[in-house]
Amino acid sequence: MNQIIQCKTHDTPAAMERLLRTIRVRGFLITHLQMRAHQDHLLVEFQVNGERSIEMLINQLAKLIDVDNVYHSQQQSAELKSA
């Protein structure tokens, strides 16, 4: 089942690499990715598919040093995580 996640990260050279590596290592496949730079941040939306819990992925992404916040876009208020 495809899930949509949105992130706001610092615009650092390795920010996207860390996001993508975490998604891959946790066993998810990215089916859609959209990123745009906004001031000193990156606004990233990706659609993932995987067998594991989406909450586990959100928690792992929120722990990344460059991530300001991450949420499951279909449940924004319930899933908001701040790093």
Image: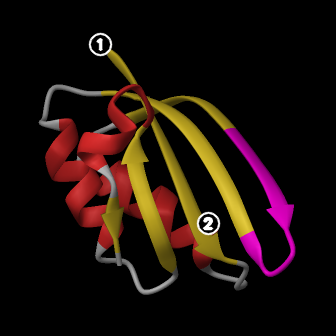
Please give left or right for residue 24 compared with residue 52 in the image: right
Q: Amino acid at mark 2?
A: Met
Is 62 in front, or is 17?
Answer: 62
Q: Which numbered disc covers residue 16?
A: 2
Q: Residue at x 69, y 56 (%)?
A: 43
Label 1 element class: loop
> Which secondary structure type mostly characterizes the magenta part of the structure?
strand
- Quadrant of residue 21 in the image? bottom left
Residue range corresponding to the magenta coloring:
34-41
Q: Amino acid at mark 1?
A: Met
Residue 78: x %, y % from top left:
24, 42
Q: Say above or below: 7 vs 63.
A: above
Q: Residue at x 49, y 75 (%)?
A: 68
Q: Which residue is mark 1?
A: 1
Q: Residues within 10 Å of mark 2 (few under 14, many from 20)?
A: some
Please give left or right for residue 2 compared with residue 47 in the image: left
Quadrant of the rendering where the N terminus is positioned: top left
Residue 14: x %, y % from top left:
63, 81
Residue 48: x %, y % from top left:
42, 30
What whole-number distance in Å separates the C-alpha atoms at marks 2 and 1?
23 Å
Quadrant of the rendering where the C terminus is positioned: bottom left
Label 2 element class: helix
